[in-house]
């Protein structure tokens, strides 16, 4: 059965052309763009279509529009961009194993950078340990989830990689989808794991930290009845 290929919207075509124009011209944050009339003529579209495209890019911070100045290249705010991630269909419809494995890739990938910064600044370790200590008095599931999101967000932020840290919104999606697999019976083990991870990073034992964090995240697979695949099987 033949399926109809959807035609792209004019707005989306213009968005791509605007991004290509900014890249090809080597424009930086604060640089001015041609006015709407000039851009509409350049792309062969109406000013209305051009305005729809610029408004969409404004939401992401890629373009800014100021009275008396016109259109300029914006400073992309990654926090603003990733705040929309939790509503993206790819995350809402993703399978359990996809969400778990994505989280493993993102968080374990950050650990070498956290260890490097921790070696240069002992305060990185102290901040993570202080966050981990807050778990000890937790009695409420919702409070536990919020603290756990905070701990893993801080772990990503401690990498010093702003684009990576911005993806902490993925944690919100993860915990909303796997709330049922977070049980008080596992809280004690999770607390101990948090300390083992940050202690391993302090000792510059990145491999041990990765192993501990991977095991903690993958424990959700076991509680959800998902069979754990070996690294070799995952690569095949």
Image: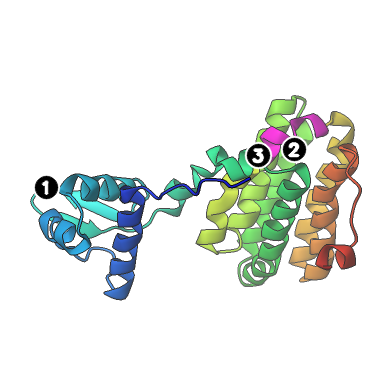
Q: How is the image coloured?
A: rainbow
Q: Residue at x 84, y 31 (%)?
A: 183
Q: Quadrant of residue 85?
A: top right
Secondary structure found at label 1? loop
Q: Nearer the viewer, mark 1 or mark 2?
A: 1
| The label number, if any, that marks residue 45 in the structure image | none
Q: Is residue 177 magenta?
A: yes
Q: Nearer the viewer, mark 3 or mark 1?
A: 3
* Residue tagged 2: 135
Q: Which residue range is magenta in the image?
A: 174-182
* Residue tagged 1: 67
Secondary structure found at label 3? loop
Relative to residue 82, is residue 156 depicted above or below? below
Relative to residue 180, is residue 32 depicted above or below? below
Relative to residue 92, is residue 54 depicted above or below? below
Q: CA distance from mark 3 to mark 1?
A: 41 Å
Q: Residue at x 40, y 50 (%)?
A: 8
Q: Foreground: 14 or 161?
A: 14
Relative to residue 112, is residue 130 depicted above or below? above
Q: Is residue 225 magenta?
A: no
Secondary structure found at label 2? helix
Q: Image quadrant for the C terminus? A: bottom right
Residue reaching furthest to the left: 68
Q: Earlier in the sequence, mark 3 or mark 1?
A: 1
- Contact (CB < 8 A) between labels 3 and 2? no
């Amino acid at each position: 059965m033949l399926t109809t290929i959807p035609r792209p919207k004019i707005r989306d075509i213009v968005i791509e052309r605007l991004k290509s124009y900014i890249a090809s011209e080597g424009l930086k944050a604060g640089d001015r763009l041609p006015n709407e009339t000039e851009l509409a003529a350049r792309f062969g579209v109406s000013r209305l279509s051009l305005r729809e495209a610029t408004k969409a890019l404004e939401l992401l911070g890629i373009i800014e529009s100021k009275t008396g100045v016109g259109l300029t290249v914006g400073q992309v705010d990654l926090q603003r961009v990733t705040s929309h991630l939790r509503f993206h269909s790819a995350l809402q419809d993703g399978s359990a194993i996809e969400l778990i494995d994505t989280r493993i890739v993102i968080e374990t990938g950050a650990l070498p950078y956290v260890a490097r910064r921790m070696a240069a600044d002992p305060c990185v370790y102290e901040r993570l340990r202080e966050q981990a200590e807050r778990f000890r008095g937790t009695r409420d599931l919702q409070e536990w989830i919020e603290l756990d999101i905070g701990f893993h967000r801080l772990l990503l932020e401690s990498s010093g990689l702003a684009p990576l840290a911005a993806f902490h919104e993925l944690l919100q999606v993860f915990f909303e989808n796997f709330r049922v697999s977070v049980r008080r019976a596992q809280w004690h083990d999770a607390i101990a794991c948090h300390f083992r991870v940050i202690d391993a990073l302090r000792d510059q034992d990145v491999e041990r930290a990765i192993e501990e964090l991977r095991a903690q995240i993958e424990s959700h697979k076991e509680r959800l009845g998902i069979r754990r695949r070996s690294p070799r099987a995952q690569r095949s």
